[in-house]
Image (cartoon, helix red, strand yellow):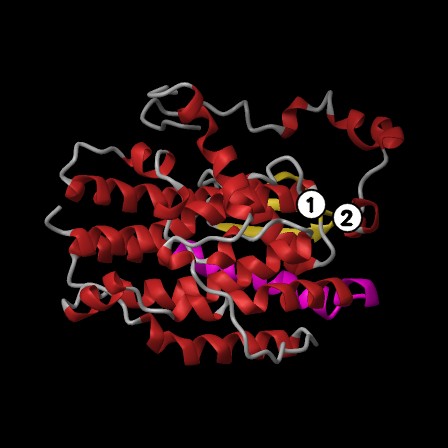
Amino acid sequence: MDNNWPLWEIFVRSKNGLEHRHFGSLHAADADMALENARDVYTRRNEGVSIWVVKSSDITASNPDNNGELFEPAKDKVYRHPTFYKLPDEIKHM
Amino acid sequence: MENQHLYNYILGIADNSLILGQRLGELCGHGPSLETDIAGTNISLDLIGQTRSFYQYAATISGENKTEDDIAFLRLERAYKNVLLVEQPNTHFGYVMGRQYLFDVFHLLLLNELQFSKDQTLAAIAKKGIKEVSYHKRFSGDWIKRLGDGTQESTTKMQEAIDYLWPYTDELFDMTDADIAMVQEGIGVDVSKLKESYYKEVTTLLTQATLKIPQINYFSRGGKNGVHSEHMGYLLADLQYMQRTYPNMQW
């Protein structure tokens, strides 16, 4: 049965105000069933207030083979991080 | 016991949830897919949770130093008051969803009324269960629509399950002595009045699912008075095994 059901990626918002986070994936015949399955598989311990489901095949992912050209050039450009500013002591949680 | 009718009334409601919860529990690890397996077990746990609240309350009014576990595990078959519908076996997934839906519709109608009971404890337990049972009904109803209006094979199997289970639906609306006494006191729900809404709702969904409504005149009944089907003994043997083999055993 599972072989015929497409895979869905599940995103759950755990609290109002937070963003949806990727929780995992599961099989379902369609989006409605994916929502119900996600509710049962990922929110049974009170983890969520909202669920998004996306068909895995609808996600376009970067190719790990291209990681070199995609991500490595950014590694030696520390000046792109705002780490050279002096923060006043009063500002916390930065 | 002073409140014999109330005690019996509580068991009449709670035993349905216990036995259906046990039936679903049998499928834990055996569901057709990981997702439906977890869903079925979740529903089972909801039902057993509701059962506990009812039994705890029943234990306090029994006046015999009983615990919820005594009520759940140490009665003889004839003392269980669940309807025949919920003890029917998990023949295949169509039966599991059919049995679930045919009970869920009744269950929700019942709790919707019971939340206005004069008995504050019963009202509170009912109110808490409404959200859970609303989801159960949505889940089982969705599956009946999928299977009924699915492939030729799924339609045949779903119809077979509905045909098998249908004769057990009428008993849901029988009034026991405890029911009558509790309705008079404003504590219980007059289940005979739920019948019309029940069949209307069930018929609508089954029609949507392209299934035929069985046309029969004979309905099976007896569970509410402790006269169960042949499946009940096996179910209880499983349910009661630990307490019978190791009396007073605790987790």
In magenta segment, residue B51: no
- Same chain check for tags 1 and 2: yes
Q: Which residues are magenta?
A: B131-155
- Which chain hosts label 1? A
Asked if residue B129 is positioned above or below residue B234 in the image, the reply reads below
> Which residue corresponds to mark 2?
A59
Residue B18 sits in which quadrant?
top left
> Which residue corresponds to mark 1?
A9
Relative image position of residue A94 (x, y in whole percent):
44, 28
Question: In this orientation, which residue lies closer to the viewer: B114 or A15?
Answer: B114
Q: Which secondary structure, mark 2?
A: loop
Relative image position of residue A17 (x, y in whole percent):
43, 47
Q: Residue at x 47, y 40 (%)?
A: A47
Relative image position of residue B44 (x, y in whole percent):
49, 44
| CB within 8 Å, label 1 to label 2 | yes
What amino acid is at disc 1?
Glu
- In-image side of B177 versus A52 (left or right): left
How many marks the image carries: the answer is 2
Relative image position of residue B67 (x, y in whole percent):
25, 33
In magenta segment, residue B135: yes
- In-image side of B195 versus B26 (left or right): left
Q: Label 2 crowding class (10 Å Cα cut-off): few <14, some 14-19, many 20+?
A: few
